[in-house]
């Protein structure tokens, strides 16, 4: 933007002259100009031209963005001041990059990319882990490669708290990246910590369940412990008028109602159990995938005995196989 226009548009944002819309973010509201936002972003253009109720009221709510981040976004699209943008903290630049990618603002995406490239060599590991996550979020291969190259500077300290906050798909890529940089036992510890913190581990993960019952073997059961089958109505209702059976208030109607309620509860419980089992299987598959990247032959016997042997991620056979693979 022309240097003479920058202060003019910045003043428009500050004094709120001619504002024709309100953007609601969290508990804060921002008075804006539709023409400026729509000229900067195809996302906002479509939103303002939509037939939704918000278009009539002039109030639009945005989610998944913090008020302070949106304030910086507005400061940029009103002035396009790359120099001011470059003075923001790295984490703010990452958030603005995501906003630009989501809201289709090519200029801020390009400027954020340039700034992050320049800042990456001096970033600490926590910032680089955030960069690694952000690069995957926006699916930017160039930024992914930049984060990978700079993470390799830290090597043995890659097993850090920030890695435990990565999403599951990005953490898997992080584990792959750490091969050859982190000692193999540290990669395993990092995986175990991530699985524990994320709540992905279940008691059934390492050892197979012993509670599975084969229905075929129960065909000749004595019936001990089974639910007692109630007597038939003909036995229970001697003397009761057959014409009144099933009418409201009769014992048969009450029993039928209770049976229906029981069946509904049973169906609901079965659905919950099926859903829970499916989730556990997904978690188990993910854990097995992560463990598949571990090279147990690069560990010492002491590592396997002191760490792997006490882990609940592997069953006894898998632990024995891991010990067998070690060479020293």
Image: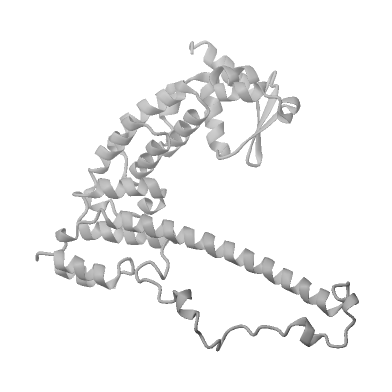
- Most foreground residue, 302 or 293: 293
Relative to 105, does residue 198 appear above or below in the rendering? below
Q: Residue at x 23, y 56 (%)?
A: 294
The answer to whether residue 130 is left or right of residue 36 is left
Name the colour scheme.
one colour
**How many marks are shown on the rendered structure?**
0
Q: Please determine whether, in this image, residue 315 is positioned above or below residue 74.
A: below
150 vs 187, nearest the viewer = 187
Q: Quadrant of residue 58?
A: top right
Please state which of residues 66 and 53 is positioned toward the viewer in this rendering.
53
Q: Is residue 320 above or below residue 174?
A: below
Is residue 213 at least partly visible in the picture?
A: no
Q: Is residue 127 visible?
A: yes
Q: Which quadrant of the rendered structure holds the C terminus?
A: bottom left
- Residue 192 in which image quadrant: bottom left
Counting from the top left corner in percent of width and height, residue 297 is at: 15, 60
Q: Position of residue 250 (x, y in %)?
A: 87, 77
What residue appears at the point 47 percent right and 32 percent down from the top-left corner? 96
Name the residue located 37 percent from the left edge and 55 percent from the top edge: 286
Q: Position of residue 199 (x, y in %)?
A: 44, 61
- Which quarter of the figure has residue 159? bottom left
Measured as percent of width and height from the top left, residue 167 is found at 42, 48
- In the image, what residue occupies the spot 46% across and 22% down? 106
Residue 35 sits above or below residue 281 on the image: above
Q: On the picture, is 225 further left or further right than 138? A: right
Q: In this image, 216 relative to 267: left or right?
A: left
């Amino acid at each position: 933007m022309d240097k003479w226009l920058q202060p003019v548009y910045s003043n428009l944002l500050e004094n709120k002259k001619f504002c024709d819309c309100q953007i609601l973010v969290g508990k804060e509201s921002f008075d804006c100009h539709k023409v400026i936002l729509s000229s900067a972003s195809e996302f906002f253009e479509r939103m303002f031209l939509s037939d939704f109720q918000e278009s009539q009221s002039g109030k639009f709510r945005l989610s998944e963005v913090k008020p302070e981040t949106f304030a910086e976004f507005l400061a940029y699209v009103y002035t396009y001041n790359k120099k001011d943008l470059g003075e923001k903290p790295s984490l703010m630049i990452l958030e603005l990059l995501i906003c630009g990618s989501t809201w289709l603002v090519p200029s801020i995406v390009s400027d954020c990319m340039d700034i992050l490239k320049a800042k990456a060599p001096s970033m600490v590991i926590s910032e680089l882990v955030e960069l690694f996550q952000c690069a995957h979020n926006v699916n930017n291969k160039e930024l992914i490669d930049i984060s990978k190259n700079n993470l390799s500077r830290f090597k043995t300290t890659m097993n850090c708290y920030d890695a435990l906050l990565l999403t599951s798909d990005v953490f898997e890529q992080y584990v792959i990246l750490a091969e050859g940089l982190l000692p193999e036992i540290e990669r395993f510890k990092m995986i175990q910590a991530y699985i524990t913190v994320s709540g992905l581990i279940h008691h059934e993960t390492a050892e197979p369940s012993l509670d599975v019952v084969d229905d075929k073997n129960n065909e000749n059961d004595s019936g001990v412990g089974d639910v007692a089958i109630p007597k038939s109505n003909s036995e229970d209702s001697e003397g009761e008028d057959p014409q009144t059976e099933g009418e409201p208030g009769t014992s048969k109607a009450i029993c039928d109602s209770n049976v229906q309620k029981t069946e509904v509860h049973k169906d609901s419980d079965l659905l919950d159990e099926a859903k829970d089992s499916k989730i556990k299987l997904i978690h188990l598959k993910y854990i097995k995938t992560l463990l598949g990247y571990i090279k147990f032959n690069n560990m010492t016997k002491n590592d396997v005995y002191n760490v792997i042997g006490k882990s609940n991620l592997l069953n006894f056979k898998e632990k024995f196989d891991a010990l067998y693979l070690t060479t020293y």
